Image: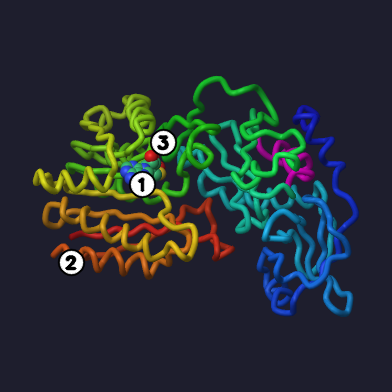
Amino acid sequence: MPSSLHPLLAELARMPGKTVKLQASNSAMASLHRGYPWLYAERVKAESHRGQPGDLGVVYDGKGRFVAVGLYDPLSPIRLRVLRASKPGPIDRAFFADRLAAALVRRLPLQGTQTDGYRLVHGESDKMPGMVIDRYGATAVVKIYTHAWIPYLHDCLASLLEQQPLDRLVLRLSRGLQEHPAYLHGLRDGQILYGDPLSGMLTCLENGLRFEVDPIHGQKTGFFLDQRDNRARVEQLARGKRVLNAFSYNGGFSLAAARGGAVEVTSLDQSGQALESSKRNFALNAQVPAIAAARHLTIQDDAFRAMAELVKQGQKYDMVIIDPPAFAVRRSQVKEALNAYGRLAHLGVSLLVTGGNIVLASCSNPVSPEDFREAVCAAAIRAGRPLQGIMESGHALDHPLDFPDSRYLKCLFATA
Ligand code: SAH
């Protein structure tokens, strides 16, 4: 099977040059010993030579003792992404096989849940820093965030295919990588690395609900897999309700609410394509009686403006779900993001019947759960509808949090 991986991958596997020896600040070495997966460029004290992305980098302490080995990337502020720390060992096919096997074991609880769309590898938290692998049925989408992965794709993906019955592998490149095309060595975003070209949409199952997935043009790798558990909770709460789902994308929460017995679900998004996709997803699941019975409406508009308009019209919902895109990617944007969450919370509670349910999510990495909760609660109080029975949740189990910096999703359930 590995022989039918794209032939370029075997060529690129021969690329790494001489291992780069690194010295790092004492505090950086201490973090590496504690398992922190990154060494920032500014904390490198010395390099034996300037290597190429994908060379191995090894950190030694002042006495020449091994600290860590990982993927070296001179183009990134993260100079080294650690594969092994404290104890040396080879970085070879067997190494990647072990890492993948461990990642697969963690996802075993998803078996028997009618879910074949889930994250197989969650980067740093699965000790595969800078790489995400999402699975949609028999297709896996491999997304890399550093050029340094390129020489290792062959061994890593060959072991993946040995361990998982997959028909197709699709490569996605983060935006940063596409800024340095010379270092891609002919690899392209959306390239098929294994299996047949994509013809039309893929679909995947999440807790028995079928969704279409476009792994090349869709957001993230095609679907927001991280909200699985939160959608299941919405399903539990939805019976008999009128639901507004703002920032609905392809209708993940809308479908969950409908299967849970919502009588009416309104999907609101500024993207016409996203709304069309949500309609197709309702059609894909029309064999479920509750979904066929639910009325699905769509509003294409800016969510802030549309919700303000609905408030003006005196519209009321039994449940309002608000799951916007990230408002902050940098610390300097946190204040503005919290303001936006506050405005959305204010609009959300204003649209609720007394005692209705509000679900508010934030995927802004630099916004802490505490700040998010506080901003949302304060806004609800200002609107005269304080939140009650607050429940907070986060990522589903295929997005483990072993690397705390990677925690981004916060989801708050409450009544008002
Ligand atoms: N809740 C979704 C994921 C949301 S992704 C899920 O469960 O899968 C964010 C969505 O917000 C995208 O579909 C994008 O089109 C939409 N969006 C971004 N800015 C918007 C705005 N100002 N008003 C309405 N929709 C917006």
Mark 1 vs mark 3: give the one in front: 1
Q: Residue at x 74, y 76 (%)?
A: 25
Element at label 1: helix
> What's the coloring here?
rainbow
Q: Is residue 332 left or right of residue 413?
A: right
Choose between 28 and 358: the one closer to the eye: 28
- Give me the C-alpha separation between circle 2 and circle 3: 40 Å
The residue that mark 2 highlights is 382
Q: Amino acid at mark 2?
A: Arg
Q: Amino acid at mark 1?
A: Arg
> Is the residue marked 1 within 8 Å of ligand 1, measured from its CB?
yes
**Which of pointers 1 and 3 lies earlier in the amino acid sequence?**
3
The residue that mark 1 highlights is 231
Provide the residue span drawn in magenta. 149-165
Element at label 2: helix
Q: Main secondary structure of the magenta part?
A: helix
Whether residue 42 is situated above or below residue 356 in the rendered picture: below
- Give me the C-alpha separation between circle 1 and circle 3: 12 Å
Q: Amino acid at mark 3?
A: Gly
Tell me where residue 13 appears, x and y as whole percent.
83, 41
Crowding at dot 3, Cα within 10 Å, few <14 / some 14-19 / many 20+, comes out as few
